[in-house]
Image (cartoon, helix red, strand yellow):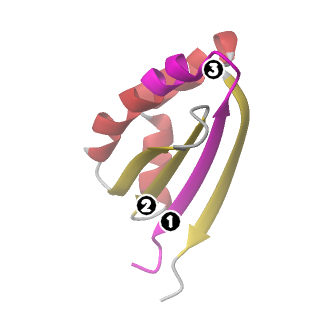
Amino acid sequence: MADTIVLNVHIEAKEGRQEDLARELQALVAPTRLEIGCLTYELHRDPEDERKFMFYEQFEDQQALDAHLAAPYFKRFVDYREQDDPVLGQTVTRWNKLI
């Protein structure tokens, strides 16, 4: 388990785009949870600011994370963002398990 990768992804939607973004983020959850090597994939929404979302993700190792990033539904999400990005800002923090 020492190779486990934890990601904490904070995403803020542009004003008026939060529901569109919420729909697209929610579409990632079910297929990602079925991936080999995905341990946890949870989407959260800030109860005080509906434009803010947070993913808490755990993958067995870098290979599992790479497979996730190469999955067709994730690539579709990247394409969606490239067309008319609803995201105002995003921060990804990567964590490795110590013990």
Position above or below: 70 against 96: above
Q: Earlier in the sequence, mark 3 or mark 1?
A: 1
Residue drawn at 50 percent across, 48 percent down: 55
Work out whether 74 lies above or below 36.
above
Q: Which residue is mark 1?
A: 5
Mark 1 vs mark 2, CA separation in Å: 6 Å
Q: Work out whether residue 69 or residue 13 is closer to the camera in this orientation and state it.
A: 13
On residue 23, the disc is none
**Secondary structure of residue under mark 1:** strand
Q: Residue furthest right?
A: 88
Return the residue at label 3.
Answer: 81
| Residue 36 picture location, percent across and down | 28, 51
Q: Amino acid at mark 3?
A: Arg
Label 1 Cα crowd, 10 Å radius (few <14 / some 14-19 / many 20+): many
Q: Secondary structure at mark 2?
A: strand
Q: What residue span does the magenta drawing correspond to?
A: 1-24
